Structures are given as structure tokens and as C-alpha cells.
Amino acid sequence: MAVKDVMDALRDVVVDNSRLSELIKDIKLIGRTLEIVYRLPRKGLEEHMVEKTREALERVPDVEDVKVRFVDDVPAQPVMGSPAFTRRRVPGIKHLIAVGSGKGGVGKSTVSANLALSLSKLGYRVGLLDADIYGPSIPTIMGIKGGKVHVDHENRIIPLEKHGIKLLSIGFLLPSEDTPVIWRGPMLMKALTQFLFDVNWGELDYLILDLPPGTGDVQLTLAQNVHMGGAVVVTTPQDVALADVKKAVAMFKEVQIPVLGVIENMAYFVCPESGKKYHIFGKGKVVEFATSYGLKILGSIPVDPELAETSDLGHPLVESHPDSDVARAFISIAKLISDITERR
Ligand SMILES: Nc1ncnc2c1ncn2[C@@H]1O[C@H](COP(=O)(O)OP(=O)(O)O)[C@@H](O)[C@H]1O
Ligand SMILES: [Mg+2]
């Protein structure tokens, strides 16, 4: 089905904060010529959109020629020159850092929690917000499962606190762990973007935001509505993870959120007997990816059974084994992040 392939390809391209697929007014495939009519979100974007469309459709079979037209129905904007949305700052937060990944299961939550603890060890006041509607695992990792939140006299949510970190999870809003995913999508995201601004975080130097994996509408909605100081991306050296993290980087770029760097997780395994390093998923792939995207590698975390185990027990490694090599690696990543963000 060629038109479906086209839609899929255009859904992955973000221009001026909209997916190309969302801007389509009309689409026709006549023979091998595809005719697309777009709504133009902003004047001057025509050339960029044509270029991005051609690029995205290069790999779609059955399409040889692409003709693009535009209709002008730019919605009236209250302030001249302002973007179609306004990004609000979360009250009390100095730096909001999003942790993203292309794929799930690459260790995004493990990294988020240990980074939050590392920043706290460096003397910063830190909060951790679990926005992963598909797998809110921060409550387990931080040992605060089943926590209940309350509101203050101004009706603002009071975050929980554990290991010196202020914590809030979308998991606290879910009726139960088995809530079907269909209920978790847009509805919950709306709730999250609203409640994000009604939290009494106090004054924090860093709020770490554990995003859902991928580049779906959830991530876009957040990125469009919340002022973020930067993002870090987590990937493993596997090809499937790298392919997806490239999309995540492209998304942050399109919504103009600076990517502070890449964290390579499960980079290698050190045999406890021989001390020998094994690059299980291959060596050098993350460096290659980071170099080609002009990104800094903030650090590499090995496969470490203790990291997994301490997470399952609710005593993250940086808190329970602060002097271990892996905890030190997290702390050094946190130092880099604080250097970069404080310099801005
Ligand atoms: N470096 C690592 N070494 C060993 N296990 C890890 C490592 N990073 C993550 N894990 C484990 O892998 C699983 C997925 O990690 P998680 O942080 O939940 O991923 P994500 O948030 O990206 O879905 C968890 O069981 C976690 O404990
Ligand atoms: Mg997770």
C-alpha cells in the first residue's frame, strides 16, 4: 500500500514542530507521481518542506516523482512572530533535562535515576519526573512503589521524596498497572502537561525527566509545551537501538531542544574472573553515531548485574554502592552535564 508507506515516511519528519503527515491537506498517487497538498504552518517554509518530503520519500517504492503544493491557512496568531505554542517554564526549576531514547529497554530509567542521584551527590537539589506512560518504572527503581501523592493548600501536588530526590511518576496517576495502553496515550499526556506546572517542587537545580521511548506524539506534546534546558539520549550499541536513537535526536533538533550528549549503556561486560572486557554488542558503533551527528559522548556504562539488581530492589547503585566503578561513571556523567548546563 503505497499511500500508507508515504504516510509512515512523512510521520517521521518534523518541520517547525509539526509532523509532515499532520500537515497534509490532500494526497494522491497518480501512476508513479505523488501529489501532496500541505497546509503551510509558516511562510518561508515551502522550500524546506519540499526538500524534507523528497528526502523522506526517496526510499518509498512506487513513487518516482513528487509534486508539492501549499495552501495558506496559517491560524491567526495572537502575537506577531511568536511560535504556534508557548513553552512554559516549570516553576522553581533551574534546569530541566529530558532523558530520551529511541527504543525501550535500553536503560533510560536506570540511567535517569542514577543520574538524578549523582547530581544530588554533587550537591545539587534534584527532582525526578517519570513521564514514561508505557512503563513507569521509576517508583520501583527508587523504592517508592505504591506511593501516594497529596496536594498543598494551593492545590499543588507535593512530590514524594526518597534518597534525597523529589519524585513524581505518571504511574501514580494510573488507576492500575494493567491500565490498557490506549488509555495511557493522549489523555494521560494532557493530564501530565497540565499537572507538570502544578507541582510544588520547591526550588530545584535539576529536574530529570524520564521520557517515554520513541518519538511519538507524547514526546512532541511535552517538547512543545514545556521549556527544557536540554536532552540526553541513551542508547545501547545495538544496530536496532542506534537506528531509533537517530530519530530521537532528529526530533529534539527539530523542536530546538539542545542535545547535550549521548550515554552509551550496556557498552561492554567485564568478566569478574579475568577482568577482561567484552564488547558484547560491538565496539565503536556509538562513537561513530555520535561523531556523525556532532554529539558528545557523556559516558559509557557497562553491563552490570549489580546495576540491574539494585534497581529491582529500589536501592539504585549510586545510592547503595557509591564507590563502585559504575557509580563513579554515573557521577562523572553528571559532572559533565552540570558543566555544560551551568556554562550556558
Ligand atoms: N548497564 C546495565 N547493566 C545491566 N542491566 C541493565 C543495565 N541498564 C539497564 N539494565 C536493566 O535492563 C532493564 C531495562 O532497563 P530500563 O532502565 O527499565 O530501560 P528503559 O527505561 O529504557 O525501558 C532493567 O531490568 C534494568 O535493570
Ligand atoms: Mg523506563
Image: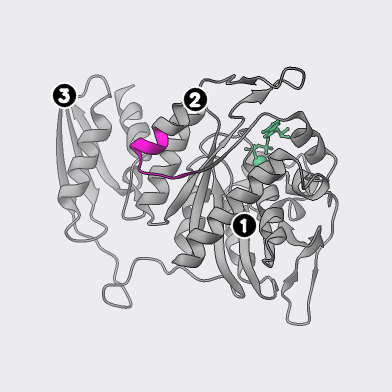
Are circles 2 and 3 on residues that touch, CB within 8 Å? no
Residue occupying image coordinates x 34% and y 21%: 1
Residue position for label 2: 240
Stretch of the chain drawn in magenta: 289-297
Label 3 and label 1: CA atoms lie apart by: 45 Å
Q: Is residue 78 left or right of residue 267?
A: left
Q: Quadrant of the C terminus?
A: bottom left
Q: Circle 3 sits in a helix, a strand or a loop, which is it?
A: loop
Q: Circle 1 sits in a helix, a strand or a loop, which is it?
A: strand
Foreground pick, 286 / 194: 286
Q: Position of residue 2 (x, y in %)?
A: 30, 24
Q: Is residue 52 left or right of residue 312?
A: left
Question: Quadrant location of ligand 1?
Answer: top right
Foreground pick, 240 / 50: 240
Residue occupying image coordinates x 51% and y 66%: 342
Label 2 and label 3: CA atoms lie apart by: 28 Å
Q: First in sequence: mark 3 or mark 1? A: 3
Q: The residue under label 1 is which amino acid type?
A: Ile
Label 1 and label 2: CA atoms lie apart by: 25 Å
Q: Which mark is residue 64?
A: 3
Q: Is residue 74 above or below residue 260?
A: below
Are circles 1 and 2 on residues that touch, CB within 8 Å? no
Mark 3 Cα within 10 Å, few/some/many (few <14, many 20+)?
A: some
Foreground pick, 167 / 157: 167
Q: Is residue 263 left or right of residue 133?
A: left
